[in-house]
Amino acid sequence: MGKGDTETTASRVVGNAFYVPPTEPAESLSEEGLVVVAGEQCELPYSVKVSVTEGTEEREVSAAVGDAVKEVLGLAEERFSGYREDSEVNRLNRAGPDTAHEASPEMLEVLAVANLVWRSSRGLFDVAAVPPRGSEGYRGSWLDVKVENGRVRMPAGTQLDLGGVAKGWAIDRLADRIAGLPGVAGALVTWAGDVACRGLRGPGVPWAVRVSAPPGASGVGDPAALAVLTLHPGDAVATSGDYAQQRAGSGPEGHHIFLPKEGAWAQRREAAVAQATVHVRGACAYADALATAALVAGVAGVKAARMMVEVAGDQLPPMLEDYVLYAREGPRVCRYLRPGGEDPVGRRTRFANCKAATVVVVGGGLAGLSAAVTAAEAGARVIILESEPKLGGNSAKATSGINGWGTQAQRAHNVRDECRFFERDTFRSAVGSHDLDPALIQVLATKAPHAIDWLRSDVGVPLEVISQLGGHSAPRTHRAPISKDGKPVPIGWLIMEYMKTTVQTRHAETITVITGARVTNLITENKPVANDYKETIRMYVSGVVYEQDGSAHELRGDAVILACGGFGADSGPGGLLQQHCPQVATMPTTNGAFARGDGMRFVSAIGGNLVDMDKVQLHPTGFVDPNDPLNQTKFLGPEALRGSGGVLLNEEGKRFVNELDLRSVVSQAILTRCGTLDVGDGKVGPHVSWCLMNKDAQEKFGTAQLSFYADRMKLFQRARNVAEAAKLIGCDEAVLRQTLDEYEKACGLGHCPLTHKTAYPTVIRADDEDLLLARVTPVIHYCMGGVQISASCEVQQMIQTTLFGKRRHIGGLFAAGEVTGGLHGGNRLGGNSLLDCAVFGQIAGDRAATILQESNRCLGTDEWTPVVLREVRNTDDRYGFNTREFRFNLHGALQLSGLEVGQFIAIRGEVDGDTVQGYYSPITRPDDEGVIGILCRVDEKGGPIVDFLNRIRPGNTAYMKAMGGLKLRFGRNGISWEDRPVRRISMLAGGTGIAPMVQITRAYLRYHLACNVEEKQALRLLYAAEESIDLAFVRTLDNIATTCPDVFAYGKILNKPPLGWTEGVGFVTPALIKEHLHFPPAEDTLIVICGPPIFEKIMCGTLAKMGYPRHTFYSFSQN
């Protein structure tokens, strides 16, 4: 096992699920090229590793680092050492209750951290609770410590123990100091096991920290290394363990952790957390304090520690990046299950099993470049075709920002946001669509923080400014700060500049960009599909035709990704706007002329689905240029104009709408409650509103950016006061003053009785000066409709003859961004456009790059295979009460599961350090490409695995394995089981045992239709359950029985039927078997039994008594 850049023990760094030995980048296995300074301070070892810029004299850096170490760690000793008599903390501890200690700035910083962690951990971390030496019966409390105006006062006997949190503070201070030295590119500082980093280890290479297992660890593979953590610049790691030291008087199994609420020293217990490691994006002082609190909570077990870390970590300034909790019993190793985060070990396994593919990306906006970069990082060769002379597309014109929740920027602004709120806001905005796909919103919401993190950390975009746009319940739309020279930074343009740099530098050898290349057609091929009983041909996309400089070219690839935008500029005769949304086709637009809807035409031409094509979004604030008011192409007025506090007024000087309502609502209000613009000569312009901003709103938006619109583009007009503003609007000054007086009152109340507005970014008053005003009008801004995709970006087509599904994917064709539909519904939520491009662009790139697999079959019986959750479908109405369908991606989009009909799988995951496992029969068919789905009860009847399944979100990893089962074979010569021909199939299902029966039914019906089987009702089912809520798939089964009465028949029986029940009552009897299943027994008839083990045992006995030979029936538990 190679070492990382550093490692920790009782503050050493931790773990990996299922104990897969951690691996590290080759660069972190050597100290070559690093300046290393090491030693001891306060009898604790420290280490500083520094990467330097080219041409830097290493001896000078080494000397400067040594000086910084002496200064900072020496200062820490002066302030916080409990073993130095004249240290500040000892002087504070000796001060009487009547003495107010004048605290140093360093002391105040540490006490502020202690206070926040005490609050967030609900008192589990308490630096004042440890009894002073010689006073074992006394314990203080942080509640008794008063910090006011830089002074600290404590009651008699209370003493502060700041050792751990102060150590973290010192590491932070030292890392900052070293990072600022000339010639330093990156630094990793370790002191007594706690770690902080700045910068990178090398160009594009992050620092790596190895986590060591605690003393006495066993059963974890290599006990010397639990995990390797990859650190972003500014990250910190801290570990606390029960083995670091023993406190005198704490008992033979006691250790140095004091339990504040119990007033006792913690005791070593096998089930207790023995080691806690916390990894944060921010100050090491917080990581140290949180790790200590985790050890305190962990006295009650791993679950208690996990819940405390997650709850407390969500309330602290630095973001929780990871944690590793270790208990000796088991042993248990619990890692942070970040919503939507893929297991790194599983990701490496996925990529190791695929072959290098060629991926063609059509479109050079954010969706296209996100797909290209992700595909290249997965090992693909990528060609980007962009129709314009340069990359960017409409993405480069985006100004409002990009949404995300739980981000570092939100944390810095003390905004607490959650996935469920963002998901709700997106659904609320999308109301009005019959084609809305909830799975797409679920993926978008879950992956939002990952997209922001990727753009910030990997691409380098400084997404540090947040604002609250219309329709949002919290400020979550991210933009970049004003540049150092004071110039405005349009966020779409900035993101695209960083993305282009990423493509041109990091991926210059694997990504080829061809501009001025307009794709005109898709190349398709018909290929045979794996099918044992009939030759089946499917269409696959294998490339594109494009035009460049008047010549046509063919470009072949293993996969094609469409990322070529919407149709917001296709307003001419016969255009897509005229075809699908003629009511807005004549309105102005913010789209570039390249937004022609090419991708929709390509897909429609080969039989793919288009959805929501009549859903075109109007943005309420397109600037009306005073010098060219009738120009059909408008400059977009960013959503942040209203998000910063701008108010909308009609020509009478009155407000008429909640400015922060949905775009659709604000646009409609302007069209119905504002007049048209009279431009003279009998010409009438669009409906216009006035956007008014005072000084405060201007500063919140950004005065430099406003200067761009006002001074350079001449889109704003200035008014010194309300009187001049009224003159510009052409309204009565008294009316405008009354409007602003009422608005000021509404701001004070937090509610507007006229518009029901409740969020007020800025108070605007009638006596404000230095006002800005601009005319705005609704404009065509975004097309919600487009190509239908799955949650894995596979382009869909309709299936006309099926009872189990309406669509399937077109092999080799993926799409992302505005070219797609089904995500935004009737109205896109502001800030979701760029997010859509980043999230689904990455997914499309991943799925396209992994399309070629070493094996056509994903699952085997010999090893556990990592699979990524694609989506979770709520199936209460379709399949039964408290059911969910969990659909997982196979490693390749064209790969098969490798199972046979009736074969089941095992699935496992980790919950609080325990491995949980369940067994399911897939409800997808073995010949379904790229996906496997299981149906689960998600209440207590689902078993322990449900705890894991209820926690994971799209993007998380589970592990699957092929198991035994029925293994029915459908071939050209008929159906067989264990080499015996089968002509008729009867099924006995009890409770949750219906899932394999549904798979058998799907397979048989497909076989029946393909081979024109003449046998009448060759498929029969008797379904028994305790109560009606236990019945699943009833609607589906009823539909099959009604649609195919000559093929399928079934009956139901309940032991506790509801009032009005007309079918079977009680238990399954021989009479019911004779009525509903095939009787008498026959050699070519197979009876399949699935349900609870006791049910299967009883049914096997009943069938035997009825004369069925044992080889004519199969039981999942008894066989």
Image (spheres, rainbow, N blue to C red):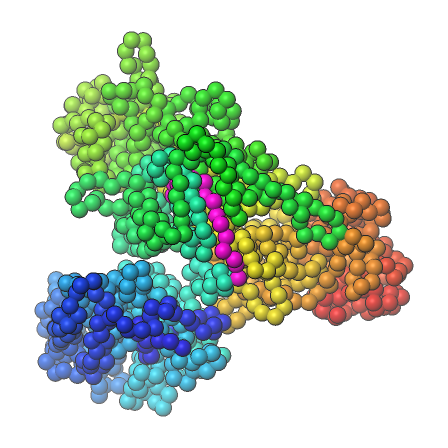
Residue positioned 20% across, 62% down in the render: 54
Is 274 situated left or right of 878 in this image?
left
Q: Quadrant of residue 648?
A: top left
Residue 775 shows up from this direction = yes
Please provide percent x and percent y for residue 575. Answer: 48, 24
Residue 355 is a magenta residue: yes
In which quadrant of the rendered image does the C terminus lie? bottom right
State the residue lying farthest toward the bottom: 252
Please provide percent x and percent y for residue 777. Answer: 33, 25
Residue range in magenta is 353-367
Q: Is residue 847 above or below residue 57?
A: above
Is 1076 situated left or right of 503 in this image?
right
Residue 912 is a magenta residue: no
Please provide percent x and percent y for residue 693. Answer: 22, 33
Please provide percent x and percent y for residue 481. Answer: 23, 46
State the residue lying farthest toward the front: 551
Q: Is residue 624 above or below residue 859?
A: above
How many badges with numbers are in the image?
A: 0
Q: Quadrant of residue 1104?
A: bottom right
In which quadrant of the rendered image does the N terminus lie? bottom left
Residue in front for this viewpoint, 641 or 1071: 641
Residue 1038 shows up from this direction = no
Residue positioned 88% across, 57% down in the render: 1079
Residue in front for this viewpoint, 760 or 965: 965
Residue in front for this viewpoint, 737 or 1032: 1032
Q: Is residue 22 above or below residue 498?
A: below
Residue positioned 9% across, 69% down in the render: 102
Residue positioned 34% across, 33% down in the render: 658
Is 460 situated left or right of 716 in this image?
right
Is 509 situated left or right of 1040 in this image?
left
Q: Is residue 186 above or below residue 685?
A: below
Residue in front for this viewpoint, 793 or 1116: 793
